[in-house]
Amino acid sequence: MNPRRVSLALAVLTATAVPAVSAAPQGPILDAGTLVISRSGAVVGREEFTVRRGRSGGPDGYTITSTATYPPASPRVTLSPAVELGPDSIPVQVQFDIHGDGQARVYARFGPRRVTLRVVRPGGESARELPATGREIVADDSVFGLYAIPPARGTRQAVFPRSGARLPAEVVDRGTERTTLQGVPRELRHDVLRLGSQERHLWYDQDGRLMKVEIPALSLMAERESR
């Protein structure tokens, strides 16, 4: 199908079949950065993310917007989520745009009892509901700015909007530990996100800014680029 027609079809479906997520709020920027994504030491992607105070429902909470491109020079896949979080860092709603890997837009709304996922594609749409715990966390194997707000500690349920998967999760605070950032030794705050049998290592500076994410099981690492 002609790419222009695909984009037009997706836009029409989004406008007519799915209630749109409100535009991202233009609250003050709390953080913005670039992550360089590597697999086994080779650069495979790049991600730009921004954290703002407030969300579409009001001034409380946060909104994370991000765009990850693979590969970084001539992108074939672009992943662009917008995640709205409450003041407690629990997700409220997500809009996740996918281009180049099966064009789609995913909506996720988080309620006290259920998570509603709606997927809009040029050929149609689908929806499903998942049981909620009230302590969800949004996860993805290819987007790392999702962790730009340190997640609440304790038992969580991870929801993967692109696949619709969910996993039991736990966030553990390891305190301040020594690591490297772009080859330079650093003392950073270390959180471990356990997703089933897999671990994600989240590293933050003293101001709570995301500096590095590691997924050892996938040989993936995303490091913040120095300005």
Image (spheres, grey):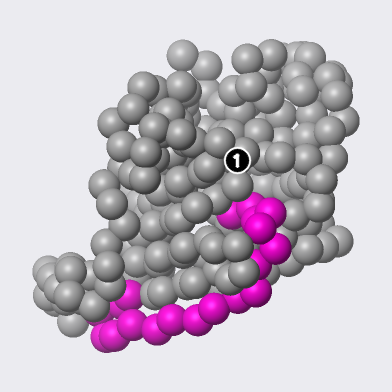
Vertical position of residue 112 compared to residue 86: above or below: below
- Residue 141 in which image quadrant: bottom right
Judged from the image, the secondary structure of the residue bearing numbered disc 1 is loop
Task: Residue under label 1, please give it.
Answer: 89
Q: Is residue 64 left or right of residue 26?
A: right
Near-viewer residue (40 or 155): 155
Q: Residue at x 29, y 85 (%)?
A: 124
Q: Residue at x 65, y 74 (%)?
A: 131
Vertical position of residue 34 compared to residue 125: above or below: above
Query: Visible in this render: residue 98?
Result: no
Residue 71 percent location from the top left of the image: 44, 49
Residue type, mark 1 in image: Ser
Q: Is residue 24 left or right of residue 139?
A: left
Q: Is residue 134 magenta?
A: yes
Packing grade of label 1 (10 A; few <14, some 14-19, many >=20) is: some
Is the stretch drawn in magenta largely helix, strand or loop?
A: strand
Considering the image in quadrants, where does the N terminus appear? bottom left
Number of marks present in the image shown: 1
Near-viewer residue (65 or 112): 112
Q: Residue at x 40, y 48 (%)?
A: 82
Q: Residue at x 61, y 28 (%)?
A: 210
Q: Is residue 27 magenta?
A: no
Residue 67 percent location from the top left of the image: 39, 44
Residue 97 percent location from the top left of the image: 36, 59
Near-viewer residue (32 or 84): 84
Query: Visible in this render: residue 89?
Result: yes
- Residue 208 in which image quadrant: top right
Q: Is residue 157 left or right of residue 109?
A: right
Give the magenta part as a residue range: 120-138
- Residue 118 in which image quadrant: bottom left
Residue 57 percent location from the top left of the image: 36, 45
